[in-house]
Image (cartoon, coloured by chain):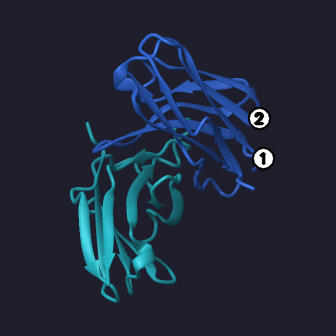
Amino acid sequence: DQQVKQNSPSLSVQEGRISILNCDYTNSMFDYFLWYKKYPAEGPTFLISISSIKDKNEDGRFTVFLNKSAKHLSLHIVPSQPGDSAVYFCAASARLYTGTASKLTFGTGTRLQVTL
Amino acid sequence: DADVTQTPRNRITKTGKRIMLECSQTKGHDRMYWYRQDPGLGLRLIYYSFDVKDINKGEISDGYSVSRQAQAKFSLSLESAIPNQTALYFCATSDLSRGGYNEQFFGPGTRLTVL
């Protein structure tokens, strides 16, 4: 039962354009969402997060949008750069629930390639 | 220096062998985790520990055991390795003191191959 889904295994975007990575979830208890970026031979690194009390969070070129009614979030990267080429994982947690607040449920990842 | 380190980085072993993967952190975090990554399946939680005396099973703990030797050390053991345990293993840490936000910090990973 995949509670966090990233339906696009890969995405190719031209440098300078917008990259949009999507994530859907099924568990209505999730109230905190994170995006991680992973380069080959390295561990995932935290990129940006959003709480369910917000619908948008922005950090430089990265913006995450949350649509709670649709149980959908997206990561926008503008403008895309070759160094953004990596695998991006969406993750979710039920932060306010004792005992599960530290557990992250990850999606399967989307491989982004930014071409010149 | 890396905040979360994992040893070994690569390991090839045979079916039935016992193997231990080690994780150390210098971040001072209380919470530590072990994940495995498989193609098409993302990262799945094996075990997690909220402090030295607290160990919890994750979603795929069968065939694995852990030991939290100290706040900074969390080891994952495969008592009798089998080929479907071939995967990339990650250790992570977190600190919930900052308002409950669960940003986890990952080690570089251990690539394990069981023949």
Tell me which amino acid carries mark 1: Gly
In the picture of the structure, the residue carrying the numbered disc 1 is B28
Res A35 quadrant in image = bottom left
- Looking at the image, tell me whether mark 2 or mark 1 is earlier in sequence order: 1
Task: Pick the residue in front: B62 or A4.
Answer: B62
Q: Which residue is mark 2?
A: B71
Q: Please state which amino acid type lies under the numbered disc 2.
A: Gln
**Dividing the image into 4 quarters, which one contains the C terminus of chain B?**
top left
Q: Residue at position x 34%, y 50% from top?
A: A107
Instruction: Estimate the x, y position of residue B65 in percent, counting from the top left.
Output: 55, 19
Chain A, chosen colour in render: cyan
Of all chains, the one bearing label 2 is B
Percent position of residue A74, x then y:
33, 69
Q: Is residue B6 left or right of residue A14?
A: right
Decide if residue A47 is on the left or right side of residue A9.
right
Residue B13 image label = none
Farthest residue toward the left?
A: A7
**Residue at image location 42% in from the left, 73% down from the top:** A84
Q: Is residue B61 above or below residue A95?
A: above
